[in-house]
Image (cartoon, rainbow, N blue to C red):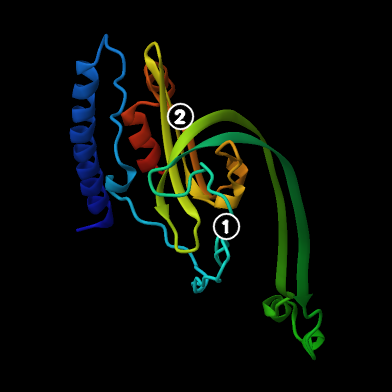
Amino acid sequence: MSIISNRILLTGASLAILGVASGCSSIDRLSQIGEQPKLAAIENPTTQPGYKPVQMPMPKPETVSYNANSLWRNGSRAFFKDQRAARVGDLLTVTVNITDKANIANETQRSRTSKEDSGITDFVGSKTLGAQAQKVLPGRLLTADSTASTDGKGSVNRQEALQTNVAAVVTQVLPNGNLVVEGKQEIRVNYEIRELIVAGIVRPEDIQSDNTIDSSKIAQARIAYGGRGQITDVQQPRYGQQVMDVLLPF
């Protein structure tokens, strides 16, 4: 079977699968016409499909020792107990403050012109030959011209700003004491839901006394801000257009 036939079959199978998936999605959307988008149920992040515990390089554990007549314990982080998040299930507030701005412009130009011209003007004894014989002798053995040029331009102009707060829950405590946190917030305004997801690893020392932490101090941070509803549906291209954008080679 030719490559074209294989591609046609693959395209047909993709369209069939997409049709079934989009059909189910369309049925769900048709059942929600005239109704507000439903908020997602509160769920345990560790029980979600695809959840994987975070594994990071850890230092060697230190042996805890106690000194006689002393209230201090080696390896302790603080002398008095505080109310900051420290165990699985504790809550803390993440202050999301993202202000990114990038402006990059690059241009590369390259040009090259070369010309090769080689030949033999007179063979030995060619003048003693007749006119007809001289026509057979080559004049120029090689004549070549080449011209190449490249002009590449690229620019990036980006400016993003996001400022909000979201409460996160501690889902895991790593062996070195760092906390894995994850928070999700949904806000419904009319027929549009705004969704904010924050996840990452924080140090207990970076948590402020009011149990808040800045998003810039979250390692392996994953911050997603988006939404779903009538406005989002209008802004997205249709399924057929997305399929054609992937499959069409031109």
Q: Which residue is mark 1?
A: 77
User: Which residue occupies the foreground of this view, 192 or 133?
Assistant: 192
At x 70%, y 80%, the residue is 137
Indicate left or right for 53 with 24 as reference: right
Residue type (three-letter) at the residue carrying disc 2: Gly
Residue type marked 1: Arg
* Residue sitting at x 49%, y 58%: 177
Q: Quadrant of the N terminus?
A: bottom left
Query: Which residue bears the numbered disc 2?
Result: 226
- Secondary structure of the residue carrying tag 1 is loop
Looking at the rendered structure, the secondary structure element under dot 2 is: strand
241 or 230: nearer the viewer:
230
Q: State which quadrant residue 35 falls in.
A: top left
Question: Residue at left 57%, top 35%?
Answer: 96
Q: Position of residue 71 (x, y in %)?
A: 56, 61
**Where does the image place residue 196, in percent across and percent down from the top left?**
46, 31
Judging depth in this view, the residue of 64 and 148 nearest the camera is: 64
